[in-house]
Amino acid sequence: MKILLTNDDGIGCEGIWALKKALETASNHEVFMVVPEENRSGVSHGITMQGPIRLRQKEQNVWVCSGTPADCVIVGLLGDLAIRPDVIMSGINEGPNLGTDIIYSGTASAARQGALHGIPSLAVSMGSHSKPFYYDTAARYIINHIDELLSLWIPETFLNINVPNLPHHIDEHRLTYPSRRHYNDQLVRFNAPDGHHYCFLEGGAIETREDDGSDWHVVEQGLVSISQIYIHPVVLQELK
């Protein structure tokens, strides 16, 4: 199977290397990586419209890209690389992408971009912000269930997968829906000596609705959450 890997945490994140190693070790997969050269967390589905995108090869089948996670997929599919993978995997993300996180997530956007090209695409994240991250647990789950995951993919969607951050083997999953999350962020303003005002976003505690069957609820139970996310905007019809 030909697999394209990317992420939003950048080339230095251990998660994508754990996934690459597991894929290459477990079976006869041909693995390619096109990865942001630096951390691009929270860039959502931004793409580079002005100026060039720089691409540099780091090693065989591994390239770093100056653009966003969505750019990485576009460059991998449409550029000189012209990779046509059987599946695109984004991650393993350092921390969760649960519920409304996927609005902001570069990890999710890369999978969405792959699905826009009609390719089965997965976003894979650790279900907790707490270190250490047990990337091998998530990688083993993907390896053991790759055929089942591909069978869950349907056109016009991507799979958003969150794996509990646990040191032991996990084999059970639930199909879920995105949870509702509220971000208690605040903006800190700094008046600098140069006369300019600078603002810094400080993330606060995240409040999540504890709805049964949501991705957050399932991960809290120690199970893998899999949500099928529709890639196109939808319009709510007036209720009759």
Image (tube, rainbow, N blue to C red):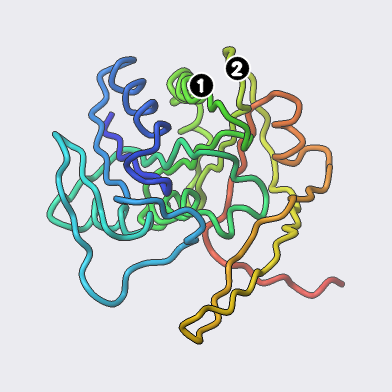
Q: Quadrant of residue 84?
A: top left
- Residue, x 25% and y 19% (percent of image)? 28
Q: Quadrant of residue 163?
A: top right
Position of residue 5 relative to residue 198, above or below, is above
**Which residue is denoted by mark 2 in the rendering?**
170
- How crowded pointer 1 is (Cα within 10 Å; few <14, some 14-19, many 20+) is rated as some
Q: Amino acid at mark 2?
A: Ile
- Residue, x 70% and y 23% (percent of image)? 222
Q: Where residue 186 sits in the image (x, y, percent)?
A: 70, 65
The one nearer the camera, 222 or 133, is 133
The one nearer the camera, 192 or 57, is 192
Position of residue 165 relative to residue 215, above or below, is above
Q: Where residue 90 sits in the image (x, y, percent)?
A: 42, 42
- Residue, x 59% and y 45% (percent of image)? 97
**Which residue is denoted by mark 1 in the rendering?**
141
Q: Quadrant of the N terminus?
A: top left
Name the residue furthest front: 193
Q: Where residue 168 sits in the image (x, y, percent)?
A: 59, 12
- Mark 2 and mark 1 in contact (Cβ < 8 Å)? yes
Instruction: Calculate the distance from the C-alpha at mark 1 to the C-alpha at mark 2.
Output: 7 Å
Name the residue furthest bottom: 195
Name the residue furthest right: 240
Q: Which mark is residue 74?
A: none
Q: Amino acid at mark 1?
A: Tyr
